[in-house]
Image (cartoon, grey):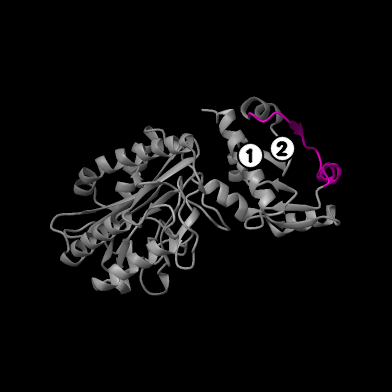
Amino acid sequence: MSVPANEIARRLTAFRAALVEASIDAALIVEATDLIHLTGVMADAHLLVPANDDPILLVRRSLERVQAESPLEDVRPFRSFKELPPLIAELGAKRVGLELDVLPAGQYLRYRDLLPDVDLVDVSMALAGVRAVKSTWEIAMISKAAEQVAAAFAAAPALVAEQSTDRAIQIELEHLMRQAGHQGPLRFRGLNGQMFYGAVLAGPDGAVAPWADTPLGGPGPSAAVGKGPGGWEIRDGDSVTVDLVGGWEGYLADATRTFFRGTPNPQLAEALAECESILAALEELMRPGVTAEDLYLRGLELATEAGFGDHWMGHGPGRVRFVGHGVGLEINEHPFLAQGFSAPLEFGNVIAVEPKLVFPGVGSVGVENTYVVDRDGPVQLT
């Protein structure tokens, strides 16, 4: 499905307004997800977005395909970085924004050498703010991704009862989601960022500390991967945390459910009930104007009052200081429901909220849904 031309036009209008507000004359966009957001296509390209003019898409590969798939009108071949200085000079741009949160240092230095008279500044926060507010079209894509997760959750109880290991459950659920249209690759912004369907973690696998900035990790198939199920042989009473990400037309939906084999471990069952209670309380706060940090702090407060403070969103040094995150083309978009993130929620934000509790050597429990922040409260998509 191609992104509608009016959808791309809306995004570019919002981005140009953000450039004007930040006193940036033009932006040079090269990161894949940002290119998809602003052009509708994946390409090896540079997108030059003047604050007060139409964008120019400079394509290395593949020009013919981009011309056919993107609604942008000015699509040109890009043969050399030396083509950039005269284009930027023609625009009269003295302050140019780059995606400094992800741009490799070597490439930044190359731009600096090519544009010695241009002030190169960070545009990543301005673009992240634009991407954080989703359109009706984007929410429809996220809802399709949510359907894949729903299909997996419907199949999970039987698999938890029948399969011998968490890895075996994961394989079956990945197969099911792929049949439901899952795109496969998932985007996670940042150095060494990577995602793959999510993770099914049983018993102590669910308490293995992550190397990534996530509450759950798992041992993974090897130390070279270091996250995901490790093949724990599921026993009576074990929790099985199923944390999955759907993917449709580039857009993602994130959700978690916890199941038990046989008679639940009493400590974990109590903890899961507390996670569900915390999520219900946080739903009351998911309204425009409430700061993102408020949700994290309220969740921590409730977990502490219930005696689970030391297990909130991880354990030991592996604990994370957030209870959720924005979701869209990437799994870790703005806003972050995190300590220190004082920006208010906005109408149109799509957020995944995930209260989780982790018990070393025993397991993990949690629940997570993806929501749209609406004027009258959250709309649950998963």
Tell me which corner region of the image, top left, top right, bottom left or bottom right, holds residue 270. bottom left
Residue 12's disc is 1
Q: Label 2, on which residue?
A: 55
Q: Amino acid at mark 1?
A: Leu
Q: Amino acid at mark 2?
A: Pro
Question: Which quadrant would the C terminus be assigned to in this image?
Answer: top left
Count neighbours of disc 2 (C-alpha within 10 A) and say few if under 14, some if 14 to 19, many if 20 or more: many
Looking at marks 2 and 1 on the same chain, the residue that comes earlier in the sequence is marked by 1
Residue 69 appears in the rendering: yes
Extreme residue toward the left, this view: 263
Q: From what the image shows, is residue 17 above or below residue 64? A: below
Residue for point 63% across, 44% down: 15
Residue 40 appears in the rendering: no
Residue nearest the viewer, comparing 99 with 289: 289
Residue for point 43% across, 52% down: 288
Residue for point 18% across, 54% down: 261
Q: Which residues are magenta?
A: 71-92
Q: Is residue 380 left or right of residue 332?
A: left
Residue 141's disc is none
Tell me which corner region of the image, top left, top right, bottom left or bottom right, holds residue 82. top right
**Secondary structure at numbered mark 2:** loop
Q: Position of residue 237 (x, y in %)?
A: 17, 60
Q: Are marks 2 and 1 in contact (CB under 8 Å)?
A: yes
**Secondary structure at numbered mark 1:** helix
Q: Position of residue 259 (x, y in %)?
A: 23, 53
Q: Position of residue 55 (x, y in %)?
A: 71, 37
Q: Position of residue 18 (x, y in %)?
A: 64, 49
